[in-house]
Amino acid sequence: MTSKSTKTKRQKKKSNNYCSVFGCCSYYSTNEDISFHLIPKSNDPKVLLKNKWGQEELVDRRRMWAILLRFSKEALLKKHIVVFSKHFTSEDFLPSGQNNKRKRLKPMAIPSQNLPKSSVLLHSPKKRSYPKNKCSPINQLESECELHVLNSDGDESCLEFVGQTMPDDSNENDHVNTLECNVQDNISANTILRELKSTGIQVAIGDLKTSFLSFIDTVKKLNTMTGICSFEILNEIIALHMTYFPDKRQHTLCLKERIVMVFVKFKQGLSFAILSILFNDFSAESCRLTYNSLIPQLAYIFKSLIYWPSRQENLKNTPHCFEQFKDVRVVLDCTEISLQRPKCLTCRIKCYSNYKSTFTLKFLIGISPGGLITYISKPYGGRASDKAIFEQSNLIELMQKPDAVMVDKGFLIDDICKKKYITIIRPPFLKNQKQFSMEDALLSKNIAKARVHIERINQRIKTFNIFCHTFPWAHIHLASDIMTIIGGLCNISPPIFSSDKFKK
């Protein structure tokens, strides 16, 4: 009898050998239908399996088990990982013999039954406990007044005690009159306290939400925070956006706040976490989504501000420093922006700049003699040369025979311009000479005097901190649109030339 009872206890006793699959509570027992199997080792040979397209390919079994059973990297570091037999089909097992009844898997067996849907336990959100009423000074005074009124009206023991101490009727009448006065005073005090309490709550709620636009009340503050030089330009941007991109959806922030938020990001280079603090009831993720969606729309609006002027328009707006170079159609220069290190090795090679000794984005920018941005190229990697960018931009197709282009010494584009009969105005090279001749020195001085204004344009673009700080790799697809918006904004800002620098 005792032997049978011990045997049943052993059969019912659970083992510490559990299935390692998430959500599977199976454990080892003496049942012959149940078996546990170790996960394949990392050095096991690969096997040929058919994929979902019917093609055979070599597959690492350990990796396939880990993917199907959703084992994490930390779980695979364990030495003892076993899988329950119910995760396999009957065809995955070898036929058992008479001497050996233990189940064995085939070399190509892969789990396909009762697979887990997740490897993370998702807890249901707990309900927030109801906040306890804290006893404020106003509530405490109010409760004291209510208790005093109730005791003076309805507490019989209090009245009896007062009546026993009265020696005569006159003192009793005087005490009743005093009690009635106290009750009226307490009722009026209670009413005043309630009014003060409701007033205090209204003031506290009103102070919680304040629009960020309320702080931008002057043109100087607007220009400092966003780079927009007037409220009229801001209102025109909003009107054009409503015309080209009408949106009837309801948003937490109005269109004006969303556009201002994008320009604050450009000018100050703030993170989305800080923007979520400045703009109430807006999360950092919502700021990022708004930023990514508005930039292409704003670039479409500002694209019309960057145009190629005619030759007659350039001649009408030629400053004094370009009197010797009247044929100049465009002044070219490349500007580089620091870039976050790319993850791809090929992108690292293309974006590394030997000149800046870091990863950069490179833009070709052209301005007219009057100081207007007339051309902005697509972004290139820092490794690209000035000649390669100029050749791929096809900017030479916009110019004709009498035109000239002013560049620095890095633009070795003589052969390209020679085919189109375009004149190159560039500072002379010293070559094998010890010093410049008088003519070359004066020419270099006049070219530098005229060409310095494109450096001023590049400096104006760099006043936007989004290009001063390291540009994030995640926003690389927005770099061209951002440069278009900032370039168009520079064109409608105060000009770099004063009115006395032009011909009258």
Image: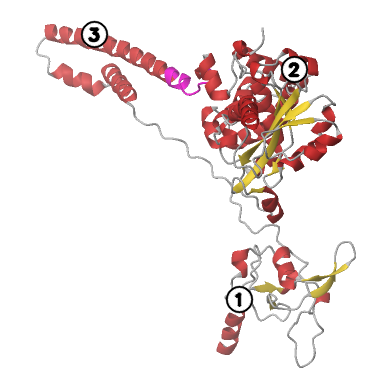
**Nearest-to-viewer mark from 2 and 3:** 2
Choose the circle earlier in sequence order: 2 or 1: 1
Let me know if residue 452 is in the magenta part. Answer: no
Amino acid residing under circle 3:
Cys
Secondary structure found at label 2: helix
- Where is 99 relative to 287, above or below? below
Amino acid residing under circle 1:
His
**Nearest-to-viewer mark from 2 and 1:** 2
Q: Give the distance between the C-alpha atoms of the residues marked 1 and 3, in whole angstroms.
A: 85 Å
What residue appears at the point 62 percent right and 57 percent down from the top-left corner?
120
Choose the circle earlier in sequence order: 2 or 3: 3
Amino acid residing under circle 2:
Asn
Closer to the camera in the image, 180 or 323 = 323
What residue appears at the point 62 percent right and 14 percent down from the top-left corner?
501
Can the viewer see residue 293 in this picture? no
Choose the circle earlier in sequence order: 1 or 3: 1
Quick check: marks 1 and 3 in contact, CB under 8 Å? no
What residue appears at the point 76 percent right and 37 percent down from the top-left corner?
390
Closer to the camera in the image, 84 or 77 = 77
Residue 143 x, y percent position in the rendering:
32, 23
Which residue does the numbered mark 1 point to in the structure image? 80
What's the magenta bit mostly, secondary-structure-wise?
helix
Which residue does the numbered mark 2 point to in the structure image? 314
Residue 250 x, y percent position in the rendering:
68, 24
Let me know if residue 209 is in the magenta part. Answer: yes
Closer to the camera in the image, 167 or 80 = 80
Secondary structure found at label 1: loop
Can the viewer see residue 208 in this picture? yes
